[in-house]
Image (cartoon, grey):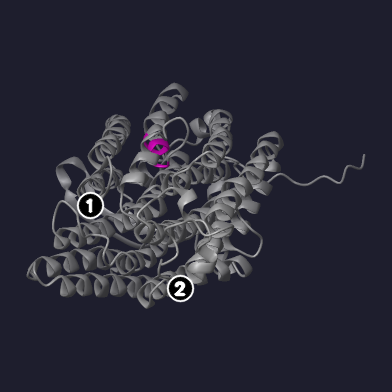
Amino acid sequence: MIWLTLLMALPLAGSVAVALVPKANEKLIKQTAFITTLIVMGTTIAMAVNFQRDNVELQFIEKYSWIPSFGINYALGIDGLALVLILMSTILAPVVVLAGWNESHGGRWSIKSFYILILVLETMMIGVFAATDVFLFYVIFEAMLIPVYFLIGGYGSGERAAAAVKFLIYSLFGGLLMLASIIALYVMSGAQGGHTFDLKALSQLEMSSTTQNLLFLGFFIAFAIKAPLWPLHTWLPDAADSATPGTSVLLLGVLDKVGTFGMIRYCLTLFPEASRTFTPLILVLAVISIVYGAILAIGQRDLKRLIAFTSISHFGFITMGIFAMTSQGYSGAALYMFNHGFSTAALFLVGGWMISRRGSSTIADFGGLQRITPVMAWMFFIAGMSSLALPGLSSFVSEFLVLVGTFTRYPVHAVIATFGIVLAALYILIPVQKALHGPTTPGNENLSDLNLREKIAIAPIIAIIIALGFYPSPLLNVINPAATHVIAQLGFSDPVPTSGEK
């Protein structure tokens, strides 16, 4: 069965169905979009059931000639990491639609356009994780910018136009660097047997160390911008601050994972020698991201910018786990991507509800919410505790694996990164204290608690956060074989612990 093509086609079909609904029938537009995302989620779960977790090779492979004169194919396939990220994407999509039932109101364009953009973006999110032809990946990687640009610029708030343009400029710059590397790979493949964009074939090309290093940088910079990694992060706070909460969930929860996914799928696979060469530098950048993002988050007064800076710190952990070159670090990074998607989604969604009720995003304006809106306050508290990796919640396991996997090979980096956990306690507990506890801030007395729709929307996210905190094995059983396989392909083996005996 062509699972991946079906998954990509369903949201596109849904977007066509939405387009056919009369613009005035807003309720039917929303219902059509929501039902579409539910069908996509159900199909993804069915595909996951058929995934062979012990098979380290790509599965559900599809390959059709697309532009034969240039050796370009429509080629798809997934491993454990791609499956986990597609599953995360398709679970978050219906949550975003339901949670943001009214957030498209007041946009520059119609509600119909809003949901068409969301569904088209879902198709691209699935495609970018499934593509195994490098040219196809690049096309989807760049095409994703279009719906995100219009979602930020058309339905955001504040300086939304400037934020959308900044996001676009950064992303296009990185994409052009990657395109240059892709063209170079294509030319070299022609000189070594036949022009191709096939990922597996390109990974077997022979190239000098200098060439590999230069091409690696073209890919890595593009992915570091998308992730984002310090110092290429500056577009993110503005985009998160201006976008609607639902768009922010997809932007930070899913699209930014394309960057860290690309580091694994393309940087490590195509340029193993260069990956080893640049590992010390990348680990330094990752540690800086962890500490820098956390310190800036502590000083934020705006709730949405706070969440954005915490994500910069989290992506530092993910990048560090990837380049620790251990199976524990890789597994932790992959699990971190999934868990971060849900903890960030919870923060942005609940934060968005708080902001819409209060009419302000200033943290100090939310004092005493625990007494006025207890359910909303508790949801924000659980999301915050997951963000700081409290034991018993999902992020703890992934952060622990990243630190353990890094410490066995790079103990200094791991120790410094651990300081980020201390800072995380500050950047979460301080706003929790200001917003949820203490005296009720004037203007909060009549705020309403979560309604039934909002409770239904946030419930699966909170359930996943708690369930994976106690039982992460279902995901790790899928991720671990791929982690061991990738590390072995790079020529590494996990360090063997020593007893200290002579």
Q: Magenta-highlighted stretch: main secondary structure?
A: helix
Mark 2 Cα-neighbour bin, 10 Å: few <14, some 14–19, many ≥20: some
In the image, taking residue 229 as reference, residue 327 lies left or right, namely right
- Determine whether, in the image, residue 25 is placed left or right of residue 479: left
Image position, residue 476 (x, y; %):
57, 63
Picture coordinates of residue 15, whole percent (x, y): 17, 64
Q: In this view, does 208 lie to the left or right of 185?
A: right
Asked whether the viewer can see residue 174, the reply is: yes
Residue located farthest toward the bottom when viewing the structure as drawn? 452
Residue topped by disc 2: 459
Q: What element carries label 2?
A: helix
Q: Name the residue under label 1.
A: 155
Would residue 225 be counted in the magenta stretch?
Answer: yes
The answer to if 64 sits in the magenta stretch is no
Reply above or below: 445 against 155. below
Which amino acid, mark 2? Ala
Which callout, 1 or 2, points at the residue further toward the start of the chain?
A: 1
Callout 1 crowding tier (Cα within 10 Å): few <14, some 14–19, many ≥20: many
Q: What stretch is highlighted in magenta?
A: 222-227
Residue nearer the viewer, 126 or 88: 88
Figure quadrant of residue 162: top left
Query: Could you tell me residue 44's position as x and y percent?
Result: 36, 70
Q: Residue placed farthest to the right in the image? A: 502
Q: What residue type is labelled 1?
A: Tyr
